[in-house]
Image (cartoon, helix red, strand yellow):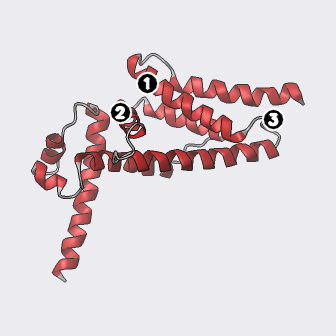
Amino acid sequence: MTRRGSYAKGIAKREEILTVALELVAQQGFRRTSIKDIADAVGLTQAGLLHYFDSKDELWVEILRRRDEIDNATDWHAADPGELLATIVRHNTEVPGLVQMFVNLSAAAATDQDHPAHAYFQERYENSRRTMAADFRAMQQDGRLRQDVDAEQLTSTLLAVSDGMQIQWLYDPSRDMARHVELVVRLAVAQVATTS
């Protein structure tokens, strides 16, 4: 009986850590948020906090997973996958610390297959490409997207624009990330009318 209660408390504490860490990174920034900051905020030592995660990098990955869970549970009211991506990118301007974290970890994970975030990003991109491409194919069936546009290539291009604009936005916050995503979608969609 004690074991079950202890397990439930452990799960609850891990959830608290992730919630607090997500808020701190979003507010303070990725590089300005330390393990000590998070540990202090949840009433643990640094060693105590890391008891709930295999490493600091695993904690960062779990924060990104939590952000994805929240984003996926949000009703963004988007008419198509391009609009949805633009809406999420626009939302990202409100959480610059999470954008910093995403850019830093994605670059590190892309260049190191042993990085704790490698599997997360690989899975995330595969899921995003699969879902968005399916939605674009549905748009083609509805006549809202040119038939000669490869749905998978359009998806990869939009994700690349989104990721690249995040880097540019970190250098220059006046860059409108979402408008660049919307431009690519408009170019693909606008040609339906001219080719029909």
Q: Secondary structure at mark 1?
A: helix
Q: Position of residue 148 (x, y in %)?
A: 81, 35
Residue receiving disc 3: 148
Tell me the number on the disc at residue 50: none
Q: Residues within 10 Å of mark 2 (few under 14, many from 20)?
A: some
Residue at the spot x=11%, y=52% of the render?
A: 47
Q: Label 1 to label 3, Cα distance in Å?
A: 30 Å
Residue at the spot x=13%, y=42% of the render?
A: 36
Q: Is residue 100 above or below residue 112?
A: above
Circle nearer the N terminus (2, 1): 2
What amino acid type is highlighted by mark number 3? Asp
Residue at the spot x=21%, y=65% of the render?
A: 10
Circle nearer the N terminus (1, 3): 3
What amino acid type is highlighted by mark number 1? Ile
Residue at the outermost left position: 45
Residue receiving disc 1: 167
Residue receiving disc 2: 104
